[in-house]
Amino acid sequence: MSNTTASDWWRHGVVYQVYIRSFADGNGDGQGDIAGLRDRLDHLDRLGIDAVWINPWYASPLNDGGYDVADYRAINARFGTVDDASAFIEEAHARDIRVIADLVPNHTSSEHAWFVDALASQPGSPARERYIFRDGKGVDGSEPPSDWTSVFGGPAWTRVPDGQWYLHLFDPTQPDLNWENEEVRAEFDSIFRFWLDRGIDGFRIDVAHGMVKDTNFPDTGGRTMILQNDQTLQGHPHWDRDGVHEINRRWRAILDQYDDKMMVAEAWVHPQRLPLYLRSDEYHQSFNFELLETPWDAKEFRTVIDASVNAANEVGAPSTWVLSNHDVMRHATRYGLPNGTPWRKWPIDGPHEALDADLGAQRARAAALITLSLPGSTYVYQGEELGLPEVWDLPTDVLDDPVWERSAHTEKGRDGCRVPIPWSPDGPSLGFGEVASWLPQPDLFADLAASIQDGDPDSMLTLYQQAIALRSEHLVDDQSLEMLDLGADVLAYRRGTITVVANMGSDPVPLPDGTTLLASSAVDGELPADTAVWILGS
Ligand code: NOJ
């Protein structure tokens, strides 16, 4: 059990990300659900995490894995009911696990009652004003209002039968809401309260830097990237506009009316702009994706960690550490690729022969000891505690991510990190459920099943369990970090009584004195390549 105090758990908590559709299937339909999650609470408890963040669980056609919400006050029938959600929240709380919901304010599903109404209403009507409808350019309005492109590929505007166009920064089934409209703002105030009143402890806010648009809709000249800290994002017509801060403050004021709540921003903005989101009346924290973008290299890790820790200290908001999530290639695979491989858009016929899976697995163990020993909070994506790799060879006919279609089949998309969890080595979906899972699991998942790893002293699961327990004991009270110089290929820092040493080079290095509390691989007098240790009292 963690020793976090009630009021600051999020400052140094370990947050476990549940991609609910792929976590555990309790009702036998091949998709994960709340019943499955409740059945697996023991796994989370034994892992020792402080909170779970649940990817969107609302009513949705699941065109974008639930980030297309049809009703923010209803649970997707495949996942359960609002009562099931309340029961889960209660059971999690009984185990001292907080629950963070995922809120999607930038867009709804096209199946949301508001959008259905908008399509059935006249141009200029109040129903259309909740979204961003505009006339097109050109004599007959047949050209989109601007050159904006969707993050998933293709134009960000779709034309409706009466000739108007609506904006969707993501899939056409995800129309952007009009945040200039007070009705939209008031609706989200009410949605926040709905879930807070049901015991939710915090919110992960999707695309927190996207709600406000330049309503003159100037062309971007192709600058549409969301998933990179692009220097040119400053002054962009729809990313990171100053107006979002007013919305942030409005939400924070609601949270502050309750005890002990938090919100974390998914904001892909320039590092210099991030502190603005972390002012005391805005977000409690924002995802720091810098480490996730960093290749396996001691110097680069050192630079990113130093910059992140300094930035966190300056704004008084804890850093967050993330290695994997439902949008990126799993790090056990990323670290098995030569540095510089373009993993974010790994093409379907990518350099698979360049992958060294064992190396990736070894580094992933060391990476766990790095991220779980840094000051701030650490987010663990489901399955990383089992060492799951990316499933890069999913057959194309099962691909579900809209990226696959929107990229005209040039990018496979994100399904490879969303393959259901193997809980046991046998059965039609390796203990995930009673039937085959919605995405097929590769054979190699059987050996990585949780039941096999549980209790095995050398398993990844045991490493995570031990690291999280030792973190609570030694690394929570004192949040300082002092970088140490133990050689160019060595990342080393002191955290209170613990010294963390990671050998990111290819040759063994001497092991500092002290008692080895935890090691990512066997150490014997020296620290082998791609190995990290926690040392007490050096
Ligand atoms: C970010 C989410 O993490 C991603 O999965 C989703 O596709 C987009 N936002 C759109 O909501």
Image (cartoon, grey):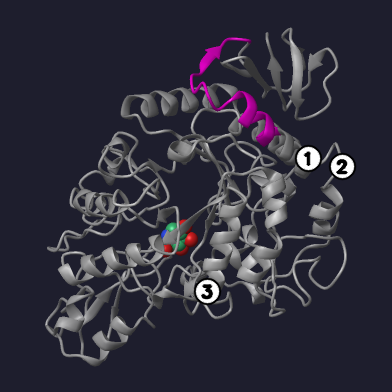
Residue 427 place in picture, x, y as percent = 86, 70
- Magenta stretch: give its range: 467-486
Q: Is residue 472 magenta?
A: yes
Amino acid at the residue labelled 3? Asp
Depth check, front residue: 137 or 82: 82
Q: Which residue is mark 2?
A: 456
Q: Quadrant of residue 132?
A: bottom left
Q: For mark 3, give the secondary structure.
A: helix
The relative height of residue 44 versus residue 359 in the rendered view (above or below) is below
| Viewer can see residue 469 | yes
> What is the spatial separation of the Cα atoms under label 2 and label 3, in whole angstroms?
37 Å
Residue 118 place in picture, x, y as percent = 24, 85
Query: Within the displayed image, which quadrant is ligand 1 positioned in?
Result: bottom left
Q: Which residue is mark 1?
A: 462
Dot 2 or dot 3: first in sequence order is 3
Residue 286 place in picture, x, y as percent = 39, 43
Dot 2 or dot 1: first in sequence order is 2
Q: Residue at x 52, y 74 (%)?
A: 83
Q: Which residue is mark 3?
A: 83
Q: Mark 2 against mark 3, which lies toward the viewer? A: 3
The relative height of residue 280 versus residue 429 in the rendered view (above or below) is above
Residue 465 place in picture, x, y as percent = 72, 39
